[in-house]
Image (spheres, rainbow, N blue to C red):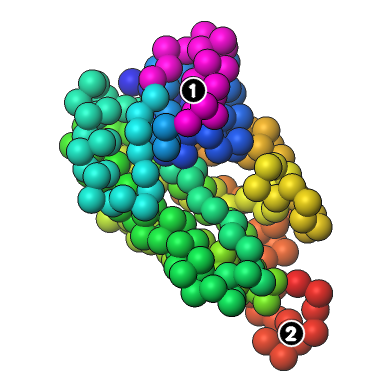
Amino acid sequence: MKDAFGLPQSLLVLGGTSEIALATARRLIARRTRTVWLAGRPSPALEQAAAQLRGHGADVHTVAFDALDPGSHEAVLGKVFAEGDVDMVLLAFGILGDQARDERDPAAAVRVAQTNYTGAVSAALVSASALQAQGRGSLVVLSSVAGERALRSNFIYGSSKAGLDAFAQGLGDALYGTGAHVMVVRPGSVRSRMTAGLLQAPFATTPEAVATAVELGLRRRSETVWVPGRLRVVMSVLRHVPRAVLRRLPL
């Protein structure tokens, strides 16, 4: 059950080794969260993440979860919800891919789309159904500003996030009034392992900053969160830049 400030006591993370997810879990554990489920592919990294969170005082469990196996999602996640109500589901898995390589390798491009969109749609619907059955709880979906406008430098990744973002908004509308709540988080470029070695875009942020924004969004019961907040204005302008002009920009 959430506390008086809207923060969760139990948390299910889909993408249990995500740096953003772990930063968010640490922040919530420091507040009130006591039970955490980390769902991801079995690996030493997943076990290390669980051990780290246990060190912060939480009761942590790991769950074998594969975004690319949607046929297993209902059974896998159903077992978590069968253990008791889940206050918050954080959908944090995704891959950046390699734009230049993926343009030459359609199979690789499809893997980006299947992970970031198809897998997320499946996991989100299963989670939303369980939250609706509970009559409460939040589904927090990590989207990206990359989904706001297709750019030459990352249109494969960006298109998958655009699809996820639109889906999550619609899902939030579908759940309105049921007690379940969807919050879409749109960070700019996040300095993490996934972006290591890449040129950092303006308004780059950190996993910790995203975690702080998620907490504030939960307290406010927000539907959309931008990180940093000024990106809302920047992307509003960028959405209206003519394509002929956009092509000339180093984006």
**Whether residue 250 is situated above or below residue 79 in the rendered picture:** below
Query: x, y (%) of residue 81?
Result: 24, 29
Q: Disc 1 marks which residue?
A: 47
Left or right, 85 with respect to 181, comes to left
Magenta span main SS? helix
Q: Is residue 51 inside the magenta stretch?
A: yes
* Frontmost residue, 66 versus 15: 66
Q: Are discs 1 and 2 less than 8 Å apart at CB?
A: no
Q: Which mark is residue 247?
A: 2
Q: Amino acid at mark 1?
A: Glu
Quadrant housing the N terminus: top left
Disc 1 on helix, strand or loop?
helix
State the image quarter where residue 208 is shown: top right
**Whether residue 143 is situated above or below residue 8 in the rendered picture:** below
Q: Which residues are magenta?
A: 43-61
| Count of marks, rendered view | 2
Q: Residue at x 49, y 43 (%)?
A: 92
Q: Compare marks 1 and 2 and give the one earlier in the sequence.
A: 1
Q: Is residue 232 inside the magenta stretch?
A: no
Query: x, y (%) of residue 60?
Result: 43, 17
Query: x, y (%) of residue 119?
Result: 37, 54
Disc 2 on helix, strand or loop?
loop
Query: x, y (%) of residue 85?
Result: 26, 25
Residue 191 visible to the viewer: yes
State the image quarter where residue 101 is shown: bottom right
Q: Residue at x 27, y 28 (%)?
A: 80
**Whether residue 146 is situated above or below residue 77 in the rendered picture:** below
Q: Residue at x 46, y 69 (%)?
A: 107
